[in-house]
Image (cartoon, helix red, strand yellow):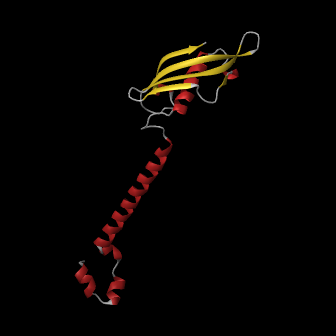
Amino acid sequence: MKYSEWNSLSDEERKNTNWHKHPHIRTATIFTIAFSLAVIIIILGISKNSTVHINRKPTKTEAYNMARNFVKDRLKQPEKAVFANTPETSLIDTATGVYNITSWVKIENGSGKMEKSVWEVKMQYTEGDWAEKNSWKLISVNVN
């Protein structure tokens, strides 16, 4: 039924006519629902990505946290190690993504005393989530 024919119907005839016989109304409803679902999916996808650490270079603090993980891998008793809260020095080459982090850690020696050791880690960020080890290329680790 065309819209012009719908206008020519009496009130009684309009009541008796089922709305499914109006294809424009049904088509518009289907497209409205599909569009609404698409918008909801896009918004949920964007909000879900807000917690991922990609598409930016790591900060000095983030690189320090990853360097501590590389140092822990070299220690005999990493669970007893006490790291500094911040790095002593950190040199960052943003062009190549090379991070050179220096700090200290207190580790337990053979006699059970805590002694302070200086460590240096040189690593390169290779893209991806900075919090994952496979996003980094370890160049060198020195613990004195």
Q: Position of residue 140 (x, y in %)?
A: 50, 15
Above or below residue 106? Residue 60 is: below
> Farthest residue in the top direction?
110
Image side of residue 47 versus residue 4, left or right: right
Q: Residue at x 27, y 82 (%)?
A: 6
**How many numbered marks have been drawn onto this rendered protein structure?**
0
Q: Position of residue 46 (x, y in %)?
A: 44, 49
| Nearest the eye: 51 or 138 | 138
Image side of residue 111 versus residue 3, left or right: right
**The N terminus - image quarter:** bottom left
Image side of residue 21 versus residue 82, left or right: left
**The C terminus - image quarter:** top right
Q: Quadrant of residue 110?
A: top right
Above or below residue 139? Residue 44 is: below
Above or below residue 59? Residue 41 is: below
Q: Position of residue 41 (x, y in %)?
A: 42, 53
Q: Residue at x 59, y 15 (%)?
A: 74
Q: Residue at x 23, y 82 (%)?
A: 4
| Nearest the eye: 107 or 90 | 90
| Nearest the eye: 119 or 112 | 119
| Nearest the eye: 12 or 29 | 29
Q: Quadrant of residue 31?
A: bottom left
